[in-house]
Image: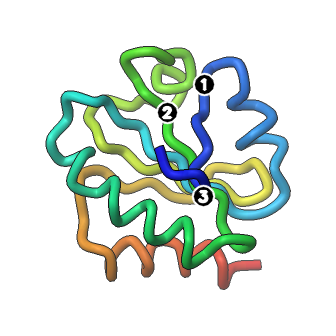
Amino acid sequence: MAKNIVEITDANFQSEVLDHKGVVLVDFWAPWCGPCRMIAPILEELATEYEGKVKIGKVNVDEHQAYARNYGIASIPTLLLFKDGKLIDRAIGAMPKPHLEQFLMGALLSN
């Protein structure tokens, strides 16, 4: 995992996501998921480009299932977007970088 992407677990979800002031993009994924592997390099690019503006984290649903269940994750990749600890948007499936940037901009531009 890239150095600027946070590994999110059941144990640290509260502190890394729900208690965070600002925007957090959480990728629910699994190592065997082809579309998850397709968007991984894009998320790494975005983590670098938006460093200091957006925290990007990944939850391996094979290892950490509590919050996946809590948020009704039925297919992966599912991206949840939080702002100041509140869920504000979700996207399901792999998408190209421009769509992911648009997804992030909605949170960054909202009050």
Disc 1 marks which amino acid?
Thr
Q: Which residue is drawn at 66% across and 71% down?
A: 51
Give me the C-alpha separation between circle 2 and circle 3.
Answer: 18 Å
Which residue, given by chain and number where applicable, does mark 2 sit on? 59
Residue 93 lies, in percent from the top left, at 24, 51
User: Is the residue 103 above or below the residue 61 in the image?
Assistant: below
Mark 1 or mark 2: which comes first in sequence? 1
Q: Which residue is drawn at 56% across and 55% down?
A: 25
Residue 9 is labelled as 1
Mark 3 or mark 1: which comes first in sequence? 1
- Quadrant of the image for the C terminus? bottom right
Give me the C-alpha separation between circle 3 and circle 1.
Answer: 20 Å
Q: Do the residues labelled 1 and 2 touch (CB within 8 Å)?
A: yes
Which residue, given by chain and number where applicable, does mark 3 sit on? 88
Query: Callout 1 environment at 10 Å: few (<14), some (14 to 19), or many (20+)?
Result: some
Towards the viewer: 18 or 49:
49
Residue 61 lies, in percent from the top left, at 40, 23
Element marked by disc 1: loop
Disc 2 marks which amino acid?
Val
Towards the viewer: 43 or 25:
43
Q: Residue furthest left?
A: 34
Q: Are marks 3 and 1 in contact (CB under 8 Å)?
A: no
Q: Residue at x 66, y 78 (%)?
A: 108
Q: Which residue lies furthest to the front in this view?
A: 3
Q: Are marks 2 and 3 in contact (CB under 8 Å)?
A: no
Q: Nearer the viewer, mark 2 or mark 3?
A: 2
Towards the viewer: 32 or 28:
32
Residue 32 position by quadrant: top left
- Horizontal arrangement in the rendering, residue 69 relative to residue 75 (left or right): right
Mark 2 or mark 3: which comes first in sequence? 2
